C-alpha cells in the first residue's frame, strides 16, 4: 500500500512516498521558498536526484508540482494518482480536539481552521494541503496527524498557566506543545534501545524550531513549547523564554507596535538576534575562530537546555536517558558537549570520542559507567506519520 506523506510548513512542503507496512521509501523531496520567484524543488528517488528552481506562488502550485514529478514519464514513481491509498498530513495545531491521528472529515477541517489563529504560520498551509490532496487523490484516505497530539497526556498542573480560569475555560489558553511526532518517534526508539518500558527520558529536539519533552513510561508529561511554538529554548529566530513584561516595555516605553514586537521575537531573535546568523554551522565556525559573540550565543543556547534538563529531572523524579535529535541535535557535537558539561549531579557523563563520531545511526555517546545514557537518535517525522496513518486505516 502506497502512502504519501505531506508535511507543509509556512513556506515549504516536505513529502515522502512510502510502501507500507514494509516502510520502504520510494521517493522524497522538499519544495522550499513557496511564494517566491526562486522556489526550490528537491526530488529524490533510488535512481535519480534533481533540483529545480522556479516560481511557485502557493502551496497548491507546489503540491501540483510534486504530483507532476511523481507521475513524470522519466523520473516518476507511479503511473497514476489512484495508486496512492493514503495521504498522511502533518497538522501543527490540533488544540484540545485531537489526541489521536484521525481520518479527515468536514468537522476535522473546521477544527483545523479554528486553530489557525493559534498557529497562523502553519495551520493554513496544512489545510490548503488537505484541500488540494482531496482533489488530486479523490480515492485516497486523507489522514491528519497532529503535532500537539502526543502532548495531550500532560497533566493539568503542568499544562495550565497561572492566569484567570476563564482564559482556560473560554479561550483554551494552556500548554499544547509541539514537535509531538518527533518526540514520540525518538522516545519510542529510545525505549526499545534501552529495553525498558518503565523509563524516564528527556527528548531534546534541536532544529530550526527547538523543544524538549519529559517522557515518562512512553508518555509526554511536560514540554517546553506551550500555547504557541514560541517559548522555551533559544531557536534559530525565536527568542524562547523571556520575561513577558519586556513586551509591555517595548510597546509602552520604546514605542514598538505589537506587530513589530511579534516580528522581533519570532523572526529576528534567537540565534539570529544574538549573532546575525540563524544557521548553527555558521555560528560554530565563527566561534571556533574566536568570535566571542558567537561563543556567547552558543553558551546561552546550551545553558537554557541545561536548565530544562534540571526541571525535567525534577518532573520525572529521575532520569534514564537524554536523547538529542533533529538538525542540530543530530549533527552538532559542540552543542551536545556544552549541554552535557558539568552535569555529573544528574549522572550525565559524555564520552568525547563517541560524541565526535558522525553517523546517521542511533548511537550512545556517554561514558561506559555513566548512570544516564546520552543517545543521538535521528528523527523521522515522516515515517512516524506513515506508521500512524497506516495503523489507523488498517
Ligand atoms: P531541522 O529543522 O531539523 O531541519 O534543522 C535545521 C538546522 O540544523 C539548521 O538551521 C542548522 O542550524 C542545523 N544543522 C544542520 N546540520 C548541521 C551541522 N552539521 N552542524 C550544526 N548544525 C547543523
Image (spheres, rainbow, N blue to C red):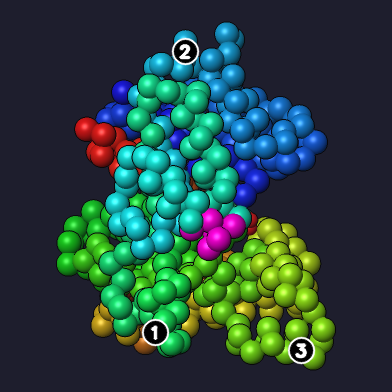
The answer to which of marks 3 and 1 sits earlier in the sequence is: 1
Nearer to the camera, 134 or 99: 134
Find the magenta span and give its range: 115-120
Residue 224 at x, y percent in the picture = 46, 73
368 to the left or right of 25: left
How crowded pointer 1 is (Cα within 10 Å; few <14, some 14-19, many 20+) is rated as few
Q: CA distance from mark 2 to mark 1?
A: 53 Å
Residue occupying image coordinates x 61% and y 55%: 121
Report the residue marked by disc 1: 165
Report the residue marked by disc 3: 252
Residue 5 at x, y percent in the picture = 44, 35
The answer to which of marks 2 and 3 sits earlier in the sequence is: 2
**Numbered tag placed on residue 80 in the rendering:** 2
Q: Are marks 3 and 1 in contact (CB under 8 Å)?
A: no
The magenta stretch spans residue 24 = no
- Residue 158's image quarter? bottom left
The magenta stretch spans residue 116 = yes
Q: Nearer the viewer, mark 2 or mark 1?
A: 1
Q: Quadrant of ligand 1?
A: bottom right
Nearer to the camera, 71 or 339: 71
The quadrant of the image that shows the N terminus is top left
Residue occupying image coordinates x 25% and y 70%: 216
Amino acid at each position: 500500500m502506497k502512502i504519501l506523506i505531506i508535511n507543509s510548513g509556512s513556506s515549504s512542503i516536505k513529502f515522502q512516498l512510502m510502501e507500507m507496512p514494509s516502510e520502504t521509501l520510494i521517493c522524497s523531496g522538499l519544495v522550499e521558498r513557496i511564494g517566491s520567484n526562486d522556489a526550490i524543488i528537491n526530488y529524490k528517488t533510488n535512481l535519480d536526484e534533481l533540483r529545480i528552481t522556479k516560481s511557485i506562488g502557493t502551496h497548491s502550485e507546489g503540491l501540483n508540482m510534486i504530483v507532476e514529478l511523481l507521475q513524470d514519464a522519466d523520473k516518476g514513481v507511479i503511473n497514476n494518482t489512484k495508486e496512492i491509498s493514503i495521504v498522511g498530513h502533518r497538522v501543527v495545531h490540533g488544540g484540545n480536539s485531537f489526541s489521536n491521528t484521525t481520518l479527515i472529515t468536514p468537522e476535522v477541517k473546521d477544527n483545523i481552521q479554528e486553530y489557525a489563529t493559534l498557529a497562523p504560520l502553519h495551520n493554513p498551509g496544512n489545510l490548503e494541503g488537505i484541500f488540494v490532496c482531496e482533489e488530486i487523490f479523490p480515492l485516497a484516505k486523507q489522514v491528519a496527524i497532529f503535532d500537539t497530539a502526543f502532548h495531550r497526556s500532560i497533566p493539568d498542573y503542568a499544562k495550565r498557566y497561572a492566569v484567570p480560569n476563564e482564559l482556560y475555560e473560554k479561550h483554551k489558553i494552556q500548554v499544547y506543545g509541539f514537535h509531538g511526532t518527533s518526540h514520540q518517534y525518538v522516545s519510542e526508539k529510545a525505549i526499545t534501545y534501552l529495553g525498558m518500558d518503565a523509563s524516564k527520558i528527556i527528548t531534546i529536539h534541536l532544529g530550526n524550531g527547538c523543544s524538549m519533552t519529559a517522557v515518562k513510561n512512553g508518555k509526554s508529561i511536560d514540554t517546553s513549547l506551550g500555547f504557541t511554538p514560541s517559548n522555551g529554548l533559544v531557536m534559530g529566530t525565536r527568542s524562547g523564554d523571556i520575561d513577558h513584561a519586556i513586551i509591555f516595555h517595548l510597546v509602552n516605553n520604546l514605542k514598538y507596535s505589537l506587530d513589530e514586537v511579534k516580528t522581533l521575537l519570532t523572526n529576528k531573535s534567537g540565534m539570529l538576534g544574538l549573532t546575525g546568523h540563524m544557521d548553527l554551522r555558521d555560528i560554530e565556525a565563527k566561534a571556533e575562530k574566536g568570535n566571542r559573540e558567537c561563543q556567547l550565543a552558543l553558551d546561552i543556547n546550551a545553558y537554557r537546555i541545561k536548565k530544562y534538563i534540571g526541571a525535567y529531572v525534577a518532573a520525572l523524579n529521575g532520569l534514564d536517558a537524554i536523547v538529542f535529535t533533529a538538525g542540530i541535535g543530530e549533527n552538532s557535537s559542540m552543542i551536545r558537549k556544552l549541554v552535557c558539561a558539568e552535569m555529573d549531579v544528574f549522572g550525565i557523563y559524555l564520552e568525547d570520542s563517541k560524541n565526535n563520531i558522525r553517523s546517521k545511526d542511533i548511537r550512545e555517546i556517554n561514558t561506559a559507567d555513566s548512570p544516564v545514557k546520552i543517545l543521538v537518535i535521528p528523527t523521522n517525522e515522516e515515517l512516524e506519520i506513515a506508521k500512524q496513518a497506516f495503523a489507523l486505516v488498517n
